[in-house]
Amino acid sequence: MTDAPSAALLLSSLLFAVGAFGVLTRRGAITILMCIEIMLNSANLALISVSRALPGNGGSGLVDGQVMALFVLAIAAAEAAVGLAIVIALFRLKGSTDIDLARLLKW
Amino acid sequence: MLPYLILIPLAPLAGFLLVGLLGSWGLLEDKWAHRIAVTFSALSFVFTLAVLTDFTGGLEKYAGGADTSYEVVVGSEHEAARFEVTYWEWLPLGKANLRGWGPEHRLTANLSFGWTFAVDALTLVMLLVVSGIGTLIHVYSIGYMAGERGYYRFFCYLNLFMAMMLTLILGANILVMFVGWEGVGLCSYLLIGFYYDQVFDKESGLTCADAGRKAFITNRIGDFGFLLGALLLIVTFGTLDFSEISAAINGASAFWYGSALLTGIGVLLFVGATGKSAQVPLYVWLPDAMAGPTPVSALIHAATMVTAGVYMLARMSALYWHAPGAMFVVAVVGCLTAVFAATMGMAQYDIKKVLAYSTVSQLGYMFLGAGVGAFVAAVFHLVTHAFFKACLFLGSGSVIARCGHSNDMRLYGGLKKWMPVTYLTFLVATLAITGFPLLSGFMSKDEILARSLFSYRGSFWLWLMGTLGAVMTSFYMFRAVWMTFHGENRSPDHVREQLKESPRVMTGVLVVLAIGAVLVGFLGVPGGVSNLLGLGDINWFEHQLHPVVAARGVVAMASDGGGHGAAAEHAATGNGDEHGAAVEVIREGMEHPALSTEWGLFGVALLVFLVGLAMASWAYGGLGQRAQRLGEILAYPRRVLHRKWFVDEVYQRLVIGPFWALSRLFDGSDRRVVDGAVNLSAAASELSGQVIKLFQTGIVRHYALWLLSGTVMVIWLMTR
């Protein structure tokens, strides 16, 4: 088997692909939000594993990637809050969370 | 009073603002409109009188003062008395390097045009005529315009006209003059179109507004020449100030004499004068200008505005003296106009058209006078003409107002029974214009004719043409008198029943002007006439004005008594003995006129008057049957004259038609080519928008797909 960062990056890529696939194919707003979370967390995984693997700080790796992951977590929380609020508003308006019903904003 | 010259135009300007603003706010009763207008107009006459007394009292008290805004010439043998005052720097343009075709070539001038007014004898004469006759016509309008729609508007335009005309006269440089020049043009346009919604010419269906436009546009053509002349003056002399230009020319007299540049400038300025003063070929607007109310025809289109060209020529006399070619053009055009307009005047039935062609013709005489160097006689004719022609126009206005606002002389006849005062004043003015001995027209017109024969810039042919025109003048004027006041009345019954004399406010003005038409001639009794009467030299007018317009430098005229002047000009032109000999002969003729020659001229003038009178009374006296029969015999020439030699039609074909075609071409190319290009780019962006909008489906997943594929593409490009 390959070494730890490569495996983590492979997993991260897989997770990202799963998330993107979900976003592009699902119609339920909640599902899409969860898929977005998966994509964000795949990015977090990649950041942390690369951060561990890089030399520096007495062999324990740089903390930069880990800090970045914390920021992403905060943003993900905010995104979830806003996203869920929109979903609730959509549900009140249409009686469903199917995002294909919200298609007024076009030419 | 002299430093407060500006009050003269400011008074009517204030009247204009007051009447115009209050009137347009609806705060002005009719009687207050004319009270204000007449007061302010009279005020400028009073100021003019004050300036006159101050000026004749001598300028010594202003000379050498500390105030640098004055420029005073006390007056001497070599220079006319003049007072100039600069109110403010108007266009201080600063230093400029000019081509300067003068003796020293390159010219660095400090270009600065001030709001400067100047007074000399010529200005004073014009001021008196304009403010005096202008005020009289204001008074007359009270009666004539009574009850008309837009009463206040009429008086406010009249006041504005006065302000602009006085500015034109007072301006000490061409720029200030040009402000007045354009201002009077504007007022003329506004007043011709005063009855803007009425048709004035049933044959062509032109409205009064069209007539106003015609006047304005024709004047624009002339003004183009005038402006070019002014610009050439700037690059040549670096100034537009009349006195500085004169000084520059007179100072290098031998250099400038006969120069092509001065001839060009003179002709260009004269083009402006042909527009403003209705000379061939730009006279066509004046007969149509009769669409305006009659007092306007009297004030603007007879007495004052149309004489601006003559005034301008007299102002620039130094330039014209040094440009014999330009003077020749002026004389020929003036002479042609005098005769040509007179022929058309003989066949008109509209009384105002007769007077309009008469005005064009008389203006032609003024230019003939100016063109042969008789500037004083030209200006004198301007003054006398202002009196008798204003009287004639106002008399015709009195008739028109009483005859149901009809201008057609075929519907008049026998009016002397009902309108004795109008008849008598009209007759006096007619006698004056036709040159009845010792009336004002005799003094001025026959002086011009005599000069055109004797002056060394005149010729026998100019004199002969002018005399021919005088015969026609006598004919058409007496024709008008006969058709209007004598014979049987031909008015419709409802008009005849109401015929009566015009109100006092109108007839009073007529009487004043008629008295003026008789007496004003005695201000400038020509040398020939006073010799015949054995009175010696009593030409007061000549004495006052001659220093202003006198030829100086090498062209000091032989008749000035300076033999050296003639010799110098002879030397300057340097072509042969023939020229010099001619100059000698003229000096003899002007200085010591042979008594027999004077009697001969007097006889010709009297004959001219009598022939015209006899022809008119033979044809139109009695019941007018002879005119009828004569008209049938001469049907074709009569039709040609009545239709004004088809000049309007020719202009339509040669100028206006091609101009319209060109305009349509430009219009088409603007719509198709220029607008087409703009519309094409608009269509292209719309089409692309139509295509691109298909990508905006409103479905979020589609956007996400585009986003993702875009990202993938970017990454692929970056890692490739």
Image (cartoon, rainbow, N blue to C red):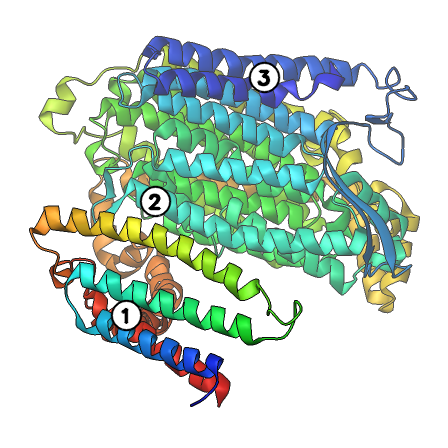
Residue drawn 42% across the image and 46% down it: B215
Q: Quadrant of residue B485?
A: top left
Cα–Cα span, label 1 and label 2: 72 Å
Q: Earlier in the sequence, mark 1 or mark 2?
A: 2
Q: Residue B653 location in percent, x, y?
A: 34, 67
Q: Which quadrant, please, contains the C terminus of chain A? A: bottom left
Q: Nearer the viewer, residue B286 or B511?
A: B286
Tags 1 and 2 both on a single chain = yes
Q: Is residue A66 left or right of residue B69?
A: left
Residue B433 versus residue B225 in the image, above or below: above
Give SS at disc 3.
Answer: helix
Residue B647 versus residue B74 in the image, above or below: below
Residue B669 versus residue B231 in the image, above or below: below
Q: Earlier in the sequence, mark 2 or mark 3?
A: 3
Label 2 crowd (10 A; few <14 / some 14-19 / many >=20): many
Report the chain holding disc 2.
B
Q: Is residue B421 left or right of residue B610?
A: left
Q: Which mark is residue B211?
A: 2
Cα–Cα span, label 3 and label 1: 85 Å
Q: Which mark is residue B704?
A: 1
Residue receiving disc 3: B44
Tags 2 and 3 both on a single chain = yes
Q: Nearer the viewer, residue B42 or B517?
A: B42
Give SS at disc 1.
Answer: helix
Label 3 crowd (10 A; few <14 / some 14-19 / many >=20): many
Residue B218 in sight from this viewpoint: yes
Looking at the rendered structure, the kind of residue marked 1 is Ala
